[in-house]
Image: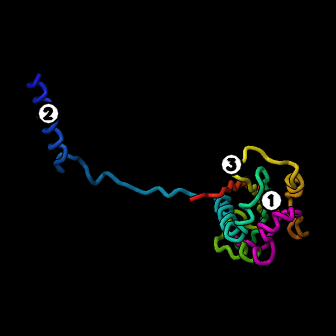
Amino acid sequence: MKTLFTTLLLTCVAHFTYSQNPESIAHLDSIVITKIKKQISQSDLLKIAVIKVLGKHLDIKLLLNTPKNISYIMSVSVVINMNGEIDTVYFSEKMSDDLKKIIKPGPELISKLKKIPKRFPDFRGKVAVFPILFKRSEDASLDYRSSFETSFEDLWPAFDYKDQKKQIVLLSPYINRFSIIYN
């Protein structure tokens, strides 16, 4: 048994030392390693840009103080001009007073959204409607007695006449699951 084990060990050692010899590896130049850059869709880039601006602008303390099982739904609609830049911003036609306090929609937020430096060529001359749901990550259900149903009914913004004729693209919704982190 010891002889068999010793023979196997020596065979393995010989094999591994030979395999480390550069001359034993054929055609080293034929191996090409390239990095594949993952392409992110224009709609995902647009959603990420809007979420980042909203996240920095909203009142996080008010959002975290939202009562249990209460959630908010809204939409942000952006009109992309022919240069691929955000030209006009619309919010849900009617938002609950609580959501307005949290999001603070107004000229400052609109200005921040218009200043997003990224261009979106896939959406030139179109309106992108982006629904967003804010809910606690630990909530298992929604309290429909809140203004959720009204917010859902008024999710679609009231567009100006010039934007009503443009193609409207409904982006996939984003669910912002927020929670309080205790250290």
Outermost residue, front side: 183
Q: Where is residue 43 in the image (x, y as percent from the top left)?
A: 68, 59
The residue depicted at 86 percent of the width and 65 percent of the height is: 97
Q: What residue type is labelled 1?
A: Met
| Residue 92 image-quadrant placement | bottom right
Marked residue nearer the N-terminal end (2 or 3): 2
SS for tag 2? helix
Q: How far apart are marks 1 and 2 (CA)?
A: 68 Å
Q: Does the magenta stretch include residue 173?
A: no
Up the image or down, 32 lies above or below 14; here it is below
Name of the residue lying farthest toward the top: 1
Q: In this view, does 115 lie above or below 140?
A: below
The residue tagged 1 is 74
Magenta region: 84-109
Determine crowd level at label 3: few under 14, some 14-19, many 20+ residues with C-alpha closer than 10 A.
Answer: few
The amino acid marked with disc number 3 is: Glu
Report the mark closest to the observer, 2 or 3.
Answer: 3
Residue kind at label 2, given as amino acid type = Leu
The answer to whether mark 3 and mark 1 are in CB contact below 8 A is no
Q: Distance between the residues labelled 3 and 1?
A: 20 Å
Q: Can residue 120 be seen in this view?
A: no
Along the viewing direction, whichever of 35 and 58 lies nearer the viewer: 58
Which mark, residue 138?
A: 3
Question: Residues under labels 2 and 3: Cα distance?
Answer: 56 Å
* Residue positioned 8% across, 25% down in the render: 3
Give the residue number, with chain letter if any, for mark 2.
9
